[in-house]
């Protein structure tokens, strides 16, 4: 089987599996939406959202202003959760023995890694786009020309996160252990992305951590696409593309390492 054929076969398999598990949609979208509702309505008066250029809301209510600021962060949070849950399928496939037959076949290891990362990215991007639509609920006058930019940023970020998640899943044999490691690695990336609060008032060292965080680039790019941010760092697009490529490279390396470690039997 050629690399592309193996990649598409794995991709279609995971997409069909997702269609049979609607609870994953609720889990991935429900948490960010609840955070958005409670934070946007309950904490808005303890924080003044920065004024963005060209984004005039229909209401000057501070609740609306902060809720609008939160939308990009909630979209990237969906991408984080959706990518993480999709990566768990690698552990399940390895436990059930499916990956044994895949790795034993002639498909190249990059095709296996990309075939697992691609459906993760597709599903995460679709769910993140649904949450991104909240921006137009709050500000119907916002132009739609930035939508492709926001979706592209979500897609690249989901590839990077999916690759990292798959690389970790290839090293961990239990779902519980995988969740613990993911909370230690990826959740802090989201918390330090300016999703909830802007980094302008942070201490110098923390401000640099935020600026160099790939999740910050994605949040700013998505925010700029809907007018919830004034813009992003000059390196945001190149950095986000490099982050996606790094994720795929890590996933491929992890698959190769697992094959060698287990004598070419397991992924």
Image (cartoon, rainbow, N blue to C red):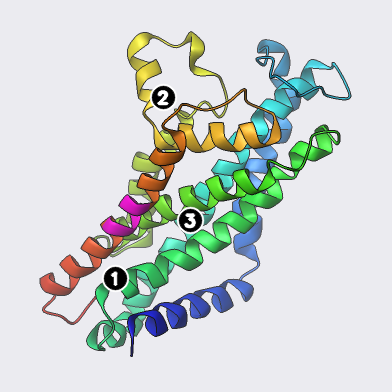
Q: CA distance from mark 2 to mark 1?
A: 31 Å
Badge 1 element: helix
Q: Sequence-wise, which precedes: disc 3 or disc 1? A: 3
- Seen in the picture, residue 92 relative to 31 is either above or below; the reply is below
Is 8 in front, or is 37? 8
Q: Sequence-wise, which precedes: disc 3 or disc 2? A: 3
Nearest-to-viewer mark from 3 and 2? 2
Q: Which quarter of the rendered picture does the C terminus lie within?
A: bottom left
Q: Range of the magenta residues? A: 245-249
**51 magenta-colored:** no
Mark 2 — residue?
Answer: 210
Label 3, residues with CA under 10 Å away: few <14, some 14-19, many ≥20: many
Number of the label disc, if any, that sits on residue 83: 3
Residue 120: x and y in percent read 48, 62
Quarter of image, res 10: bottom left
Could you tell me if the residues under marks 3 and 2 are in contact, i.e. CB atoms within 8 Å? no
- Seen in the picture, residue 242 relative to 190 is either above or below; the reply is below
Extreme residue toward the right, this view: 58
Nearest-to-viewer mark from 3 and 1? 1
Q: CA distance from mark 3 to mark 1?
A: 18 Å
Badge 2 element: helix
Q: Residue at the spot x=46%, y=39% of the render?
A: 237
Is 93 in front, or is 118? 118
Mark 1 — residue?
Answer: 110
Residue 130: x and y in percent read 70, 51
Q: CA distance from mark 3 to mark 2?
A: 21 Å
Q: Which quarter of the rendered picture does the N terminus lie within?
A: bottom left
């Amino acid at each position: 089987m050629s690399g592309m054929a193996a990649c598409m076969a794995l991709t279609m398999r995971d997409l069909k599996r997702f269609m049979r598990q609607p609870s994953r949609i609720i889990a991935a979208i429900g948490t960010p939406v609840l955070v958005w509702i409670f934070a946007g309505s309950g904490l808005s008066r303890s924080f003044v959202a920065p004024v963005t250029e060209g984004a005039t809301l229909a209401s000057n209510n501070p609740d609306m202003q902060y809720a609008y600021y939160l939308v990009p962060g909630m979209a990237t949070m969906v991408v984080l959760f959706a990518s993480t849950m999709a990566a768990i399928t690698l552990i399940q496939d390895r436990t059930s023995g499916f990956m044994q037959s895949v790795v034993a076949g002639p498909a190249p290891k990059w095709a296996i890694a990309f075939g697992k990362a691609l459906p993760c990215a597709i599903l995460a991007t679709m769910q993140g786009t649904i949450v991104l639509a909240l921006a137009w609920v709050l500000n119907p006058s916002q132009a739609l020309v930035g939508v492709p930019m926001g979706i592209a940023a979500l897609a690249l970020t989901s590839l990077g996160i999916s690759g990292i998640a798959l690389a970790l899943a290839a090293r961990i044999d239990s779902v519980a252990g995988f969740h613990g490691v993911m909370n230690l690695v990826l959740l802090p990336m989201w918390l330090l992305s300016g999703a909830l609060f802007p980094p302008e008032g942070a201490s110098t060292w923390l401000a640099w951590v935020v600026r160099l965080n790939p999740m910050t680039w994605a949040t700013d790019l998505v925010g700029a696409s809907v007018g919830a941010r004034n813009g992003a760092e000059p390196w945001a697009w190149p950095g986000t593309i490099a982050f996606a490529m790094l994720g795929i490279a890590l996933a491929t390396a992890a698959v190769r390492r697992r094959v060698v470690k287990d004598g070419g039997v397991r992924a």
